[in-house]
Image (cartoon, rainbow, N blue to C red):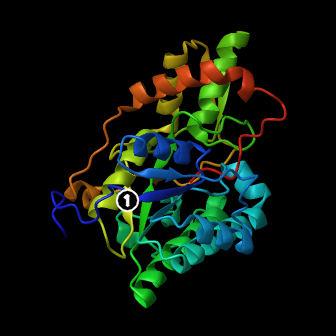
């Protein structure tokens, strides 16, 4: 392992393309990179369709980035994965292949692929080490997204093996923060609960029912911590193995619900619905590889949820519009 004090890849003066810059992860990356001596390149979806091979190759050729961070993906929770399996596979595979191949052919010097902790087996040992990949069956409720992300990770590895390209992969845990998806049909658990408890308090609801038993344990990390970790990896890491990025602590879903209810100010009852799926029983990442490189997260969960709630309140009017479906192509 290269000591973290040694800057393997200086960022000064680099042109960095953030694919998916309007999403939660992409916008956090842009905020973080704004503090660096770099030029940030972006392309809105109406100007660049990442599922179009010709469009991606033309954009990459014309804009010549030095670094590419792939933070664009079709994402969603259990319901979205179950209802649109073809889209989750097809769109994510197209994005990964198009952006990586075009970046390589354009001669980029560094590429960072953002995967997901859902790539690991459903029954992986806890905390989950990077070598657990492909050691068991996936969680059925998000297997389509997980399969696409595994393919992207392996494609990075293949470019390194065949062409000695400096392509690296990071596997973030469950993320939340400003710019999250709060749509009731497609959001992940933390954002979904935050909106539901807010609306329950506003409407004076006597109770809120959460999916499943409330016993599965999850790890959550603020998206600004992920962005900081990505900059650290760009500077200090070059290897074929993926790197877990997480907080290192977890809590059960019922505990998360109680925490969000307290922050929002909801004092009604919290009920569970065991008829609904729980998903993976536990998902906690082993982050020792990243910690050995000198990086740790800095935003505690309650502080991060409180700041996310303030962002939600500031943007509630636009988030509540019926036509606003919380862009699926933008988050990792």
Residue lying at 41% horizontally and 26% vertically, measured from the top left: 302
Given residues 52 and 190, the one toward you in this image is: 52
Report the residue at 41% width, 82% height from top. 160
Quick check: can you spot residue 269?
A: yes
Q: Where is residue 31 drawn, in percent x and y? A: 46, 39
**Extreme-right residue of the structure:** 323
Q: Nearer the viewer, residue 8 or 205?
A: 8
Depth check: give the residue in front, 306 or 121: 306
140 vs 302, left or right, is right
Q: Is 66 displayed left or right of 264 in the figure? A: left
Image quadrant holding the C terminus, namely: bottom right
Q: Quadrant of the N terminus?
A: bottom left
Residue sitting nearer the eye, 8 or 144 = 8
Q: Looking at the picture, does residue 18 appear above or below residue 135? A: above
Rendering quarter of residue 82: bottom right
The residue depicted at 58 percent of the width and 78 percent of the height is 101
x and y, in percent, of residue 5 in the image: 15, 57
72 to the left or right of 308: right
Q: Quadrant of residue 319?
A: top right
Residue 213 can be seen, yes or no: no
- Judged from this view, the residue extending furthest toward the bottom is 162
Q: Residue at x 28, y 60 (%)?
A: 10
Determine whether 208 is above or below 180 in the image: above
Q: Position of residue 11 (x, y in %)?
A: 33, 57
Disc 1 on helix, strand or loop?
A: strand
- Where residue 47 appears, x then y in whole percent? 73, 55
Vertical comparison of 176 with 57: above or below = above
Q: Which residue is mark 1?
A: 244
């Amino acid at each position: 392992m290269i000591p973290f004090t040694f800057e393997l890849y200086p960022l000064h003066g680099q042109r960095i393309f953030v694919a998916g810059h309007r999403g939660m992860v992409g916008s956090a990356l842009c905020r973080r990179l704004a503090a660096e001596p770099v030029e940030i390149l972006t392309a809105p979806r109406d100007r660049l369709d990442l599922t179009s091979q010709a469009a991606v190759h033309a954009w990459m050729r014309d804009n010549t980035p030095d670094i590419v961070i792939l933070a664009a993906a079709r994402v969603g929770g259990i319901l979205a994965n179950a209802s649109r399996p073809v889209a989750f596979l097809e769109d994510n595979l197209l994005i990964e292949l198009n952006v990586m191949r075009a970046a390589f052919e354009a001669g980029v010097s560094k590429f960072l692929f953002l995967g997901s902790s859902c790539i690991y087996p459903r029954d992986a040992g806890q905390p989950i080490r990077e070598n657990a990949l492909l050691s068991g069956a996936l969680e059925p409720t998000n297997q389509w997204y997980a399969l696409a992300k595994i393919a992207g990770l392996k494609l990075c590895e293949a470019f390194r093996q065949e062409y000695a390209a400096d392509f690296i992969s990071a596997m973030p845990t469950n993320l939340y923060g400003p710019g999250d998806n709060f749509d009731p049909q497609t959001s992940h658990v933390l954002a979904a609960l935050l909106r539901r408890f807010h609306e329950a308090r506003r409407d004076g609801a006597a109770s809120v029912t959460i999916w499943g038993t409330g016993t599965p344990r999850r790890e959550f990390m603020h998206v600004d911590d992920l962005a900081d970790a990505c900059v650290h990896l760009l500077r200090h890491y070059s290897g074929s193995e993926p790197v877990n990025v997480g907080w290192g602590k977890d809590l059960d879903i019922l505990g998360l619900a109680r925490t969000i209810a307290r922050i929002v100010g909801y004092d009604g009852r919290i009920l569970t619905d065991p008829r609904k799926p729980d998903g993976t029983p536990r998902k906690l990442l082993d982050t020792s590889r990243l910690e050995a490189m000198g990086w740790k997260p800095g935003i505690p969960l309650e502080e991060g949820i409180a700041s996310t709630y303030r962002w939600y309140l500031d943007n509630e009017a636009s988030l509540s519009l019926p036509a606003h479906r919380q862009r699926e192509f933008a988050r990792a």
